[in-house]
Image: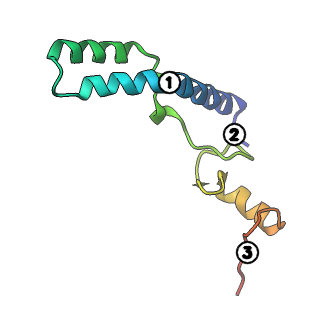
Amino acid sequence: MAKKSSIEKNRNRIKLVARYAGKRARLKEIANDKDLPIEDRFQAGLKLSEMPRNGAKIRVRNRCEVTGRPRGYYRKFKMSRIALRELGSAGQVPGLVKSSW
C-alpha cells in the first residue's frame, strides 16, 4: 500500500488539472500561434507560467485504484500488476482468465 500522503497529493493534482484545463489550453494555443504578434504570445506565456504547476496534466501520476501503487500500472484496468493478478485469480475481474500450462 502506498503512502496516504502520496495518494492524496495525486488526487489534488487531478482536481487542479480539471479546474485549469480550459484556461491552460487557451493560453497554450495563443502562445504557440505563429500568426499572432510576439507581445501577445509572450504575455500568454507569462500567464501560463503564473498558473500552478500541479495544474499541468503531465504532473498526474497513474496509480493503482486498489493499492495506490505507482509502478506496474495497467491503464485498461486502472490497476497495478500485483492487484490485477490477485483479483484475477479470485475471479473478480470480468473477462480475465489466469493462464497456466
Q: Which amino acid is tagged 2?
A: Ala
Image vertical order of residue 39 relative to residue 69, above or below: above
Q: Which amino acid is tagged 3?
A: Lys
Q: Nearer the viewer, mark 2 or mark 3?
A: 3
* Residue occupying image coordinates x 56% and y 28%: 18
- The mark that comes first in sequence, 1 or 3, is 1
Of 45 and 79, nearer the camera is: 45
**Rendered location of residue 83, percent (x, y):** 73, 56
Q: Left or right? Give the position of 4 relative to 37.
A: right
Q: Quadrant of residue 81?
A: bottom right
Point out the image quarter for the C terminus. Answer: bottom right
Of 53 and 45, nearer the camera is: 45
Cα distance, mark 2 to mark 3?
Answer: 26 Å
Cα distance, mark 1 to mark 2?
Answer: 20 Å
Q: Report the residue marked by disc 1.
A: 54
Q: Nearer the viewer, mark 1 or mark 2?
A: 1
| Neighbour tally class for label 1: few under 14, some 14-19, many 20 plus, Cα within 10 Å | some
Tell me whether the residue at label 1 lies in contact with that at label 2, contact meaning CB atoms closer than 8 angstroms: no
Image vertical order of residue 100 relative to residue 42, above or below: below
- The mark that comes first in sequence, 2 or 3, is 2
Of 43 and 50, nearer the camera is: 43
Residue 63 - label: none
Image vertical order of residue 42 relative to residue 68, above or below: above
Residue 98 - label: 3
- The mark that comes first in sequence, 1 or 2, is 2
Q: Which amino acid is tagged 1?
A: Asn
Image vertical order of residue 37 relative to residue 67, above or below: above
Q: Report the residue marked by disc 2.
A: 2
Q: Residue furthest bottom?
A: 101
